[in-house]
Image (cartoon, helix red, strand yellow):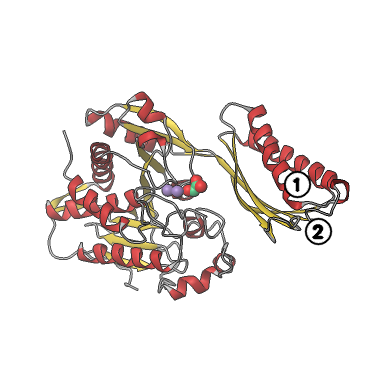
Amino acid sequence: MGSFAKAERLLARLQALGQVGALPGGGVCRLALTKEDGAGRDLVCSWMRAAGLNVVVDGIGNIFGTRAGTQPGPSVMIGSHIDTVATGGIYDGNLGVLAGLEVVEALNDARIATLSPITVAAFTNEEGARFAPDMLGSLVHVGGLDLGHALDTVSIDGARLGDELTAIGYAGTAPLGAIKAAAYLEYHIEQGPVLEAEAIDIGVVEGVQGISWTEVTLSGRSSHAGATPMRLRQDAGLAAARISAGVAEIVRALGGDMVGTVGSMKLSPGLVNVIAEKAVMTIDLRHPDEATLKVAEAKLADLIASVAAAEKVTAATRVLARFEPVGFDHALVGRVEASAKALGLSTRRLHSGAGHDAQMLARTCPAAMVFVPSVDGLSHNVRELTQPRDIANGLDVLATLALDLAGRANTAMAGQPHTNIKES
Ligand code: GLV
Ligand code: MN
Ligand code: MN
């Protein structure tokens, strides 16, 4: 059993969008607000307009394409992101946006009108790999971060977010939060190993774990690697290495679902025979339970202080992102599960290890997510893969639930879709 949506068209679009910023050996690099991100946005907007959607862009560059309903009112919003990490795959985020587009195109093809509008959303800088925090566009959309503050965010390459947005032509004029959602659905690859290991078709996501990102800058003193006795060193590189190992010890001691990652460490001047005078490192801590995440953060603070004292360096910390665990709307989660079961698909409830725009939208409307298996549980890796059959299964769940939520109008679709919001 399937749905009215066409997986072949979605799969072809995933491949086509995956060509924008494609890496030579496979995978894609479309870091937020780079010219590659701009080109990906242009392609997605052109598909949205060809499908008759009314496309608007807000002040943080979030893109919304709306298919009108027969009644005014809030939309059923289907969204995700199209920015990627520097060594990303073609599915993370892109699947959710392009599947939303496929839902509306398939409704167009079948000339099915809906009572509520359906909006396809692509949120700015979900990854947080170039600009912190992650989920920045959806956070601004729900009013969780001031626009001016967000526009002044500086990237890992020293660029100001607002300038980069203008440079790629996506500093939009639509008012923030103007597109209201009655419900938000996000279809995403699992990015972990659970569904594949248990041979489950559909992951029904109950929530997202808490996220804590810290940047640590360690300042010591450069001196000669051969001539400086160990006892006279102020080695920022050694301090960073000790903190990195200490993070793993903290996380392993807490056990269970606790995870911690030092994903970036830069030493200056970064030369073979010079003791590092500066180290800048990032620490990503995550746990589904807020109290445990707080314990890990406190242990990290103690670790940084004790290593800095022992290695005679100074340490300055900066919070890059901090989001509490989020639980999705019980009723909507139940409807995801029921839709999958009605299609004859096997389901399992689970928590998301990754952050998602859905956790921000959940602040303002019922939100839920549909997961499909990731081959080898891999994501944020150029080898990221989800099998076509699994893509089709998730699309069917999304399409049937979206139509159910938007409500089928008795009249067939007539003329061009429209909305009240002026295109920008
Ligand atoms: C962002 O998507 C993250 O989970 O790191
Ligand atoms: Mn994602
Ligand atoms: Mn990601």
Q: Secondary structure at mark 1?
A: helix
Residue of label 2: 223
Counting from the top left corner in percent of width and height, residue 236 is at 75, 52
Q: Position of residue 350 (x, y in %)?
A: 43, 31
Compare residues 202 and 240 and report the one nearer the observer: 240
The answer to whether residue 363 is visible is: no
Q: Is residue 87 visible?
A: yes
Few, some or many residues within 10 Å of mark 2 (<14, 14–19, 20+): some
* Marks 1 & 2, CB-CB < 8 Å contact: no
Quadrant where the C terminus sits is bottom left
Q: Is residue 15 above or below residue 401?
A: below
| Residue placed most toward the observer, 35 or 412 | 35
Q: Amino acid at mark 1?
A: Ala
Q: Given the current orientation, which residue lies at the most extreme front position? A: 226
Residue at 78% x, 40% y: name it: 302
Q: Nearer the viewer, residue 252 or 333?
A: 252
Looking at the image, which residue is at 49% across and 38% down? 353
Residue at image mark 1: 239
Left or right: 212 with respect to 52?
A: right
Residue 186 rendering spot, x and y as whole percentages: 37, 46
